[in-house]
Amino acid sequence: MTPRATLITGIGELVTNDPAVGDGSALGVLSGAAIVAAEGRIAWLGAAADAPAADERTDLAGRAVIPGFVDSHAHLVFAGDRAAEFAARMSGTPYDGGGIATTVAATRAASDGELRTLLTARVAELRAQGTTTVEIKSGYGLSVQDEVRALRLAGEVTAETTFLGAHVVPAGVDRDAYLHLVTGEMLTACAPLARWIDVFCEPASPHAFDGDEARAVLTAGAAAGLGLRVHGNQLSAGPGVRLAVELGAGSVDHCTYLTGSDVDALAAGDTVATLLPGVEFSTRSPYPDARRLLDAGVTVALATDCNPGTCYSSSMPFVIALGVRELRMTPAEALWAATAGGAAALRRADVGVLRVGARADLAVLDAPSYLHLAYRPGVPIARALTV
Ligand code: NIG
Ligand code: FE
């Protein structure tokens, strides 16, 4: 039986992220294009006038189409919220990671069913804003059984699961004993459920991990077959970025405080710098220097970091608007970073791009052009369309 094919027509502006087609830019923008999707993949893409016949037809009435957003950094398995902590920060209390303990307590107290309901609602919230791929971290369990539970739940909604047992040292637990657990029994239990391992490498936080501790976590994770990701340089110019590049991590995330040698290392390596400007918005921290990274030739991704502490927003359009306004990215750079950049950070070639063979993961905009993502901040113009 031949697979059912859907022809998508009436596309106002099509961003492919394939520089071989369209206007010659990195975004590969086409006008007057159509797409045929079958079995979740793009089967054909080209001028609408040349489109082949298909079983079904969807007319988008002039709306723009872009690759679905790839949110390569999110913490979606948690219970409770920390609105009071946010309010205190807006009055000047700095962020140091101490509030993570509050979320750990609420998450441990929640039932599997409660956590699943919260998680699926959050994934639906992302999709409603155009996200079609999301990476989801554990890190609010911090015991073997609670980290395993978080990864099981995350694995029900995404293939991009990340073991973040090394988020912080849990309250009342000896630091060396916890490091031993995270690199031993907890890793053994969690590795089969995860694609990646991550560590909050931040010597400026009394709760997080220093460079030597982070190296131990990452090398143990690599030995267990996991890809590497790092929370680095969020609160200070610490060792996270250089460690991530040295160990060949897919991505180092935050990059708020960078030295010249951090930028040089990123430019020479193939670790993606993932910027999370929703965090700076929600913590009143200075924004990272995206221009310095881009001008040095570093691959930059944008992601939400959706979590109850430093950024309780699941909106990639909001992040794009911040990228343009606060990080001085062009609208094209910000859109690329939120799609192809996220795919690079996850080492995925089948998402973040629209070409034959890629996943038919689209975002449709209630607008004629992708420029409206930053031009109309706060307006819900993007939604996911998986055909
Ligand atoms: O990416 N910085 C470490 N982890 C999260 C925040 C976690 C929390 O405060 O709950 C982040 O910002
Ligand atoms: Fe994070």
Image (cartoon, rainbow, N blue to C red):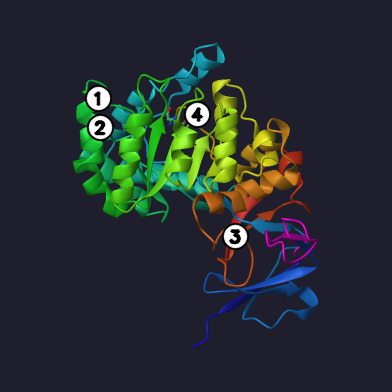
How far apart marks 2 and 3 lie (CA) works out to 42 Å
When the figure is inspected, residue 144 is found, relative to residue 260, above or below; the finding is: below
N-term mark: 4 or 2: 2
How far apart marks 1 and 3 lie (CA) works out to 45 Å
Secondary structure of residue under mark 3: strand
Which numbered tag is attached to residue 279? none
Q: According to the image, label 3 marks what residue?
A: 385
Please tell me which residue lies in front, 49 or 239.
239
N-term mark: 2 or 3: 2
Q: According to the image, label 4 marks what residue?
A: 233
Magenta residues, start to end: 11-28
Which numbered tag is attached to residue 179? 2
**Residue 302 seen in the current view:** no
When the figure is inspected, residue 253 is found, relative to residue 158, above or below; the finding is: above
Picture residue at 49% right of the left edge, 39% below the top: 252
10 Å crowding of disc 3: few (<14), some (14-19), many (20+): some
Task: Give the number of the mark in front: 2 or 3.
Answer: 2
Secondary structure of residue under mark 1: helix
N-term mark: 1 or 3: 1
Asked whether disc 1 touches disc 3, contact meaning CB atoms under 8 Å apart, the reply is no
Determine if the magenta segment contains residue 283. no
The kind of secondary structure the magenta stretch mainly shows is: loop
Residue type at mark 1? Arg
